[in-house]
Image (tube, rainbow, N blue to C red):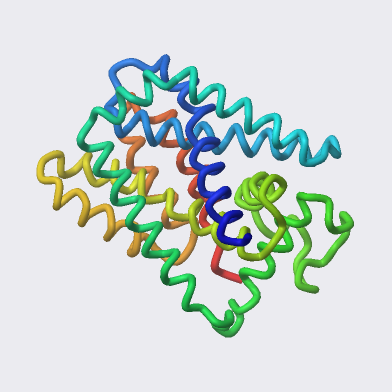
Amino acid sequence: MIALKVAYAAVLLACCSLGPGLAVVRRFRGWWPLERLCAAVAFSLFILYLAGSAFFGLGWGSRAYDVFSIFCLVLLAVCARDLYAMLASRRVRKALLWLALLSAWSLAALTVIRHYSGGGWGGDWLEHFQRCLFFLGKFPLDVKLIGVYALPARPPLMNVLGAFVMAQVGTEFQVFQVTFLLLNALIFLPCALLASTFARRGGRRIALAAHLAYFAAGHSARHRAGDVAALGQHPRRRVYANLCVVLVAGLQRERHH
């Protein structure tokens, strides 16, 4: 049962992280296919964040999340031609392949964890799990998460996105783990785009540079957001880069307590 829920979470996240954004970027002209893919994911996650925040504020239940996911699937179907055009790019296919391999490797690594330690960081997973449950209405507004932190202690974007998936799949800790892992893996896409900006030829160099950027970007969200901000040096990419900075800062869980 848990395996089916994990698979459902992955498929749900893949559809919802593309559909809304594709409806936005299909109007953009002159962008690289990989650039359009990254922008589609960025816009989609931001739209999901707005929707999830609205559902929480209005007190709507899981049916609202289901309806919005169906809406995302409809948008994905409407934009199928744009998606196929992006997938026709060898660079996009290679980036998605590396993203899939990285996600699979991370999932395999996750299966060997017996318990979470790490000193002061030992409760990090539990805290963010409780934050997702908070946005599902499981805790009172004045709750102290893991008995220490108030809600404003962390940016909410990652947790709202986690709650969006958990509201439809299940509130098990395993579902939360996989959802957060896949969301964090998405940082690979802007890293691949950043690498291709400086190494437009040589697929192996691009893949290697993207992986180095992924693993060496730093310990906190601020460092990774700064790496993506470099994309904004090109005038055509500034709006997209600024949005990516916000999303990366929200997606990467802050590690400094």
Q: Residue at x 49, y 17 (%)?
A: 78
* Quadrant (top left, top right, bottom left, bottom right) of the C terminus: bottom right
Q: How many marks?
A: 0
Q: Residue at x 47, y 78 (%)?
A: 112
The residue positioned farthest toward the front in the image shown: 1
Give the image location of residue 37, x and y in percent: 37, 33
The quarter holding residue 132 reads bottom right
Give the image location of residue 183, x and y in percent: 51, 51
Q: Residue at x 31, y 35 (%)?
A: 233
Left or right for 117, reference 131: left
Return the residue nearer the eye: 158 or 93. Answer: 93
Give the image location of residue 126, x and y in percent: 67, 70
Q: Residue at x 41, y 18 (%)?
A: 26
* Quadrant (top left, top right, bottom left, bottom right) of the N terminus: bottom right
Left or right for 73, reference 81: right
The residue positioned farthest toward the left in the image shown: 202
Left or right for 77, reference 66: left
Against 239, is 122 above or below?
below
Give the image location of residue 77, x and y in percent: 49, 22
Left or right for 151, reference 252: right
Return the residue nearer the eye: 67 or 116. Answer: 67
The quarter holding residue 232 reads top left
Against 232, is 168 above or below?
below
The quarter holding residue 61 reads top right
